Amino acid sequence: MNMCSKCHKEMIMKQEQAQLAASSIDSIVNGGDGGKGPVIAANVDVAVPQVEEKTIVVQPMHVAETSEAAAVIPKAKEGPNRCATCRKRVGLTGFNCRCGNIYCSVHRYSDKHDCQFDYRTAARDAIAKANPVVKAEKLDKI
């Protein structure tokens, strides 16, 4: 019913009290125990909040062929991580380059492993994005 744990516990306690009161009233009316034990009688009104029901419709994706879907998903590399230049095992200490390969500490710099990533163009694009051209309108002379 979309309630927090505190509100849910309070609702359960009220329902249990209402059931206890109803059972004690039934025992008094039917002459259950004859007055030997204490009788607890109370009128408890339990307010149940109205909950809106929402339905979510999910449409399944249609895949034309399974071979095309398998071709799109790249395979995970199996085995230990190795430097792309010297094939040395790097394990967790490997360095990821922007060209997408993993390198050891000797070949981690772009000039040491003949990197194909264009750092100059990437830097120009980042600067152009960070500093848009601001040009004010021409003022009319008075």
Image (cartoon, rainbow, N blue to C red):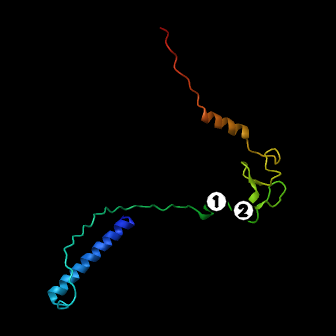
Q: For this rendering, which residue is in front, 66 or 6? A: 6
Q: Position of residue 137 (x, y in %)?
A: 51, 20
Q: Is residue 115 above or below residue 135?
A: below
Q: Quadrant of residue 84?
A: bottom right
The quarter of the image holding the N terminus is bottom left
Q: Quadrant of residue 82?
A: bottom right
Task: State the residue at coordinates (81%, 61%).
Answer: 89
* Mark 1 Cα shell of 10 Å, populated few (<14), some (14-19), many (≥20): few
Relative to 54, 46 lies left or right? left
Label 1 secondary element: loop
Task: State the residue at coordinates (53%, 21%).
Answer: 136
Q: Position of residue 39 (x, y in %)?
A: 20, 83
Q: For this rendering, which residue is in front, 70 or 141? A: 141
Q: Position of residue 111 (x, y in %)?
A: 81, 44
Q: Is residue 110 above or below residue 14?
A: above
* Mark 2 Cα shell of 10 Å, populated few (<14), some (14-19), many (≥20): few
Q: Position of residue 15 (x, y in %)?
A: 28, 74
**Amino acid at circle 1:** Ile
Task: State the residue at coordinates (38%, 64%).
Answer: 4
Label 2 secondary element: loop
Q: Which residue is mark 1?
A: 73
Q: Is residue 96 above or below residue 37?
A: above
Tell me the tag on residue 60. none
**Amino acid at circle 2:** Lys
CA–CA distance in space, label 1 to label 2: 12 Å
Q: Which residue is mark 2?
A: 77
